Amino acid sequence: MDEDKKKEQETDWVDQLLRDVAREAEEPAPAPEVPADPEPAPPPPPQKPRSRPAPPPKKPKKRRPKRVRVRRVGIAYSLIYIAAALVLCGAATVFCLRAAADVLAINQPDMAVEIEVPEGTDLEEYSHILKDAGVIQFPWMFQIVAQYEGMGEIAAGTFVVNRNMGYTSLMDAVEKSDQPRQTVTVTIPEGLTINEIADLMEENGVCSASDFIRDVNATDFGYDFEEEIPQDENIYYSLEGYLFPDTYEFYTNDSALNVINRLMSNFESKIEGVRAQIEQSGMSLHEVLTLASIIQAEAPDEENMALVSSVYHNRLNNPAEFPRLECDPTRNYANEVVSDSAAAGSQQAADEYNTYVSEGLPPGPINNPGMAAINAALNPAESNYYFFCSNLTTRQFYYAETLAEHEQNLTRAHLR
């Protein structure tokens, strides 16, 4: 019993202690004491102002440059800009190269072109004539260059120019001279070689022989028959045989292109009359002219031309027994014209022209034959002759079917 009371008293004591602690916690804390204000300090005695030097002027502040914000574009746009610039530069370069090539006729084909210049043609009209003929590309540029060079009055007429002529040469080709043009009549005998025709032109003041040889050897004149000339490297002059012998009236101091074109134009008109016969002959135009040139060099008249033609036709038709024509004029042409050339392979070409060495016809004509020789080549006489010779003094001809008869004829002709 006493122990229970004792426990109750201890419990009450603890409860009382807890209640006291809770009550103290709920009561507000007392405010802190504020000390009384101290007495104000006496003001300091006034001081005598002292003189001070004026402060240095302040340096103006440097303004920083305003930063410009650069707009950044993507790499794709940059590549587009670069590509566009390169395209423009490339186009400008191509145009400049084309313009220079047109002015100087660089890399242009060696092709003759015939142009017609009407009376009263001015510079602008002439430039368009050249453009329409395929000689130049830029008429406006030709006009600028011609005005700068001081091109004179343009002459009327038919002119032959070359596509490889520069602007200056094209101006000179049609510029009217202060002196009236003189003409000269020139007869080109049948059977002359190109070299001999060139010398004849120079002797008559028509054009220089060197210009004639240069232009005849390389220029394409655009005639259809030129396409029938074989592309054989052994042909010495491709136009040998195609310059028709005749009587012409030329201007003095003319261009070689004009002269050659006249001869070829005449040949074209003449050969049209025997085109059907050439097709029926079984020979090409080039072969007919080659044989005709040999006949022209051998025979002086139409009767002997037909007989000489029969000799060569008989040999050509019997190559097993007569593989070579053995014609003296071909040997002369090989030695006097072809072998004298300094060109590489000239000796091989000379051997091809020499019918004592090569078989059959030579690569091309050995001169420029007339219509009589051409007709003889197409219409040989009927004979069984395989040999002929002639007296060099009397020009009498002797024909034979066998070698034995030919040996006798050589004695008769005083060739032995």
Image (cartoon, rainbow, N blue to C red):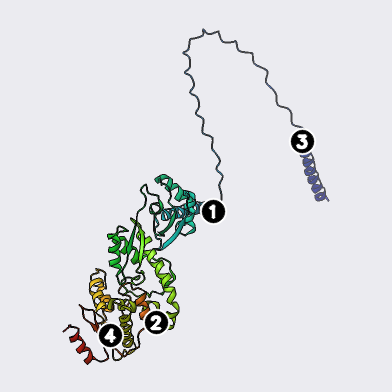
Residue 24 — which label?
3
Q: Give how far across and how far down residue 231 sits, in percent.
A: 37, 74
Element type at marker 4? Answer: loop
Give the mark toward the camera: 1 or 3. 1
Residue 324 — which label?
4
Please, what is the three-letter code of the amino acid marked with disc 1? Ile
Give the mark toward the camera: 3 or 4. 4
Give the mark toward the camera: 1 or 2. 2
**Around disc 3, counting alpha carbons within 10 Å, would you say few (fewer than 14), some (14 to 19), or many (20 or more)?**
few
**Around disc 1, counting alpha carbons within 10 Å, would you say few (fewer than 14), some (14 to 19), or many (20 or more)?**
few
Observer able to see residue 86:
no
Element type at marker 1? Answer: helix
The residue carrying mark 2 is: 283
Distance of mark 3 from mark 2, alpha carbons?
150 Å
Q: Residue at x 41, y 75 (%)?
A: 228
Left or right relative to 382: residue 158: right
Please, what is the three-letter code of the amino acid marked with disc 2? Met
Q: Give how far across and how far down residue 287 sits, in percent.
A: 36, 79
Distance of mark 1 from mark 2, alpha carbons?
65 Å
Give the mark toward the camera: 4 or 1. 4
Query: Does the residue at mark 3 contact the one at mark 2 (Cβ under 8 Å)?
Result: no
Residue 247: name its quadrant. bottom left
The residue carrying mark 1 is: 80
Q: Is residue 72 above or below residue 267?
A: above
Element type at marker 3? Answer: helix
Distance of mark 1 from mark 3, alpha carbons?
87 Å
